[in-house]
Image (cartoon, helix red, strand yellow):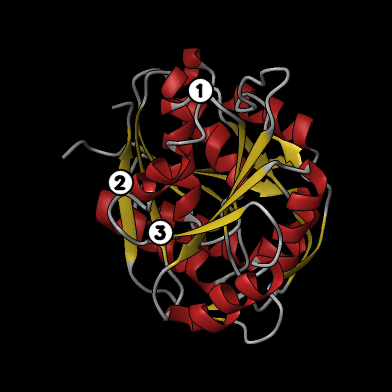
Amino acid sequence: MVKIDTVIAVAGWEERFAKGLRLDVASNLPARVFLFSFEEYLNETESGRKEVSKFAEENGARYGEISVRRDPRALWRKIRETFSPSDWSQRSVLVDITTMPREVIWWTFSQLQAANCSVSYIYYRPTGYSSEWLTRDTDQPRLVYQHSGVSTFGKQTCLLLMSGFDTDRAAQLIQFFEPGAVLIGLQTGAQYDNLTKNVEQTKKLLERKPDIKFFDVDAFSPDHGLAAIDGAISAYVGNFNIVAASLGPKPTAVALYFLQRKHTDIALAYAPSRQFNMSYSGGIGEALHGVVRDE
């Protein structure tokens, strides 16, 4: 096992943020704990950041954080500047993606790989989600800098979606991209009322639309559904401009990162929410982990 020298995360307000980082530090004894903190949520994340700072220093880890803004161009530049090869070359890094936005996951992975880091990741599932809304007021979808693929003129778009609890966001992405084909990965299992809140709602909203195909995916499997996703797009690669978005369990963002590394023409898209439930989740459950590498 490679010794982890730095743990990286994004500051969150969920219970599993600080509890997860406590486990990261206790298990790996890194020399450094590094956070990105969004300026828009500094008040909401203050107690968690103080807790992380305290136990990091108690365990001999140097604590640091950088404030960032939700503006995508500024955020992308800040991540590129932060993880420069001159400062991060050859480091062994654990990226805790538990409360990390999907854009930040993709940019962090790619920048650390460009710096020749040894990169692993970990994700802590919650014990439950709020019974009310989780996210709402979705902003305009956008292609992700550095991961926007290669579009071929004259080809139709195939939209690849990993569904989640926010079905309105899926409908908005379909309306925005006006695809000729839509592939929707439905998370398997009954956890977190998935069948009622995700599968049934997604099918009810979208199954009558033309050119939509559903397939099963398991974000909590060892490959986070990558093999199922790759199989689902096999007939579309080369024939469509494929745009992929992760709306479901966070590990599907990891699967899409690996998918785009394999099929570099695929574009990753992101549809950020403008409102978050401050009681988004509760508790901390099973940890999922893996290594970021090109096969």
Q: Left or right: where does residue 60 sit relative to residue 65?
A: left
Give me the disc on residue 290.
2
Q: Position of residue 147 (x, y in %)?
A: 60, 28
Occupied quadrant, residue 89 = top left
Name the front one of labels 2 and 3.
Answer: 3
* Residue in the image at 58% along x and 70% along y: 14
Q: Secondary structure at mark 3?
A: loop
* Residue in the image at 66% along x and 79% along y: 279
Please state, as top left, top right, bottom left or bottom right, where the N terminus lies in the image: top left
> Is the residue 206 above or below the residue 1 in the image?
below
Q: Amino acid at mark 2?
A: Gly
Q: Is residue 120 visible?
A: yes
Taking depth in this image into account, of 15 and 174 the one nearest to the observer is 174
Q: Which residue is mark 1?
A: 264
Give me the disc on residue 170.
none
Occupied quadrant, residue 251 = bottom left
Q: Position of residue 276 (x, y in %)?
A: 74, 67
Of callouts 2 and 3, the N-terminal one: 3
* Residue in the image at 48% along x and 18% along y: 87
Of callouts 3 and 1, the N-terminal one: 3
Q: Secondary structure at mark 1?
A: loop
Q: Amino acid at mark 1?
A: Thr
Q: Left or right: where does residue 136 sit relative to residue 127?
A: right
Sort mark 2 into few (<14), some (14-19) or many (20+) by Cα contacts within 10 Å: some
Taking depth in this image into account, of 132 and 11 the one nearest to the observer is 132
Q: Secondary structure at mark 2?
A: strand
Q: Which residue is mark 3?
A: 219
